[in-house]
Every structure is written in structure tokens, then in C-alpha cells.
Image (spheres, rainbow, N blue to C red):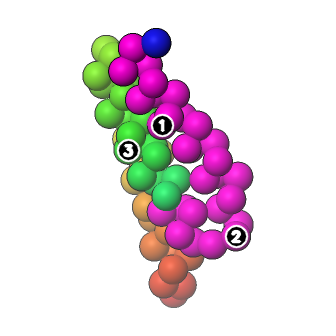
């Protein structure tokens, strides 16, 4: 397994775990956003720019969800 593949496996595994834990704390939403950013980096590094772009959008969506969960209006 290459380092890039291991990085990608870590990123998507972290996304899955933090997504499953989101209801426990807003901090898991932030962790999910960070994992999405890692997934985006992985996508761009391995040459799958559509995957990288979608993961970047998910990162922004998760950051907004964290903000609204942390600072309700």
C-alpha cells in the first residue's frame, strides 16, 4: 500500500467515524469537516479532481453546520 493510498484510507475512515458521531457533539461536525478537507486533498493528489472538488464542497457545508450548531441564531 502506497503512502497516498494509506492517506486516502485514513481520510475516508475518519469521515465515516466522525459522521456517525456528529449527534454527540458539535465538535464531531468540525472533525468531519476536517476529514472532508483531507479527503479533498487526497482526491486532488491522486488525480481525481471531481472527487477533490466535491469533498471541498462537503467541507464547507460541514463547517457551516458546525457554526450553526455551535452558535445558534
Mark 1 burial class by Cα count in 10 Å: few <14, some 14-19, many 20+: many
Residue wearing tag 2: 24
Give the mark toward the camera: 1 or 3: 1
Q: Is residue 44 magenta?
A: no
Q: Is residue 45 above or below residue 58?
A: above
Helix, strand or loop at label 2? It is: helix
Residue 29: quarter of image: bottom right
- Tell me the residue that label 3 is attached to: 37
How far apart marks 3 and 2 lie (CA) works out to: 21 Å
Cα distance between the residues tagged 1 and 3: 9 Å
* In contact (CB < 8 Å): disc 1 and disc 2: no
Q: Which residues are magenta?
A: 2-30
Instruction: Find residue 6 and report its horizontal and vertical position in percent.
Output: 45, 24
* Neighbourhood count class around disc 2 (C-alpha, 10 Å): few under 14, some 14–19, many 20 upward: few
Question: What is the secondary structure assignment of the residue under circle 3?
Answer: helix
The residue pinned by badge 1 equals 11
Amino acid at each position: 500500500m502506497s503512502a497516498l493510498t494509506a492517506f486516502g484510507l485514513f481520510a475516508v475512515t475518519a469521515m465515516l467515524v466522525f459522521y456517525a458521531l456528529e449527534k454527540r457533539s458539535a465538535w464531531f461536525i468540525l472533525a468531519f469537516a476536517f476529514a472532508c478537507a483531507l479527503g479533498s486533498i487526497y482526491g486532488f493528489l491522486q488525480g481525481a479532481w471531481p472527487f477533490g472538488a466535491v469533498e471541498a464542497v462537503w467541507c464547507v457545508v460541514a463547517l457551516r453546520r458546525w457554526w450553526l450548531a455551535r452558535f445558534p441564531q
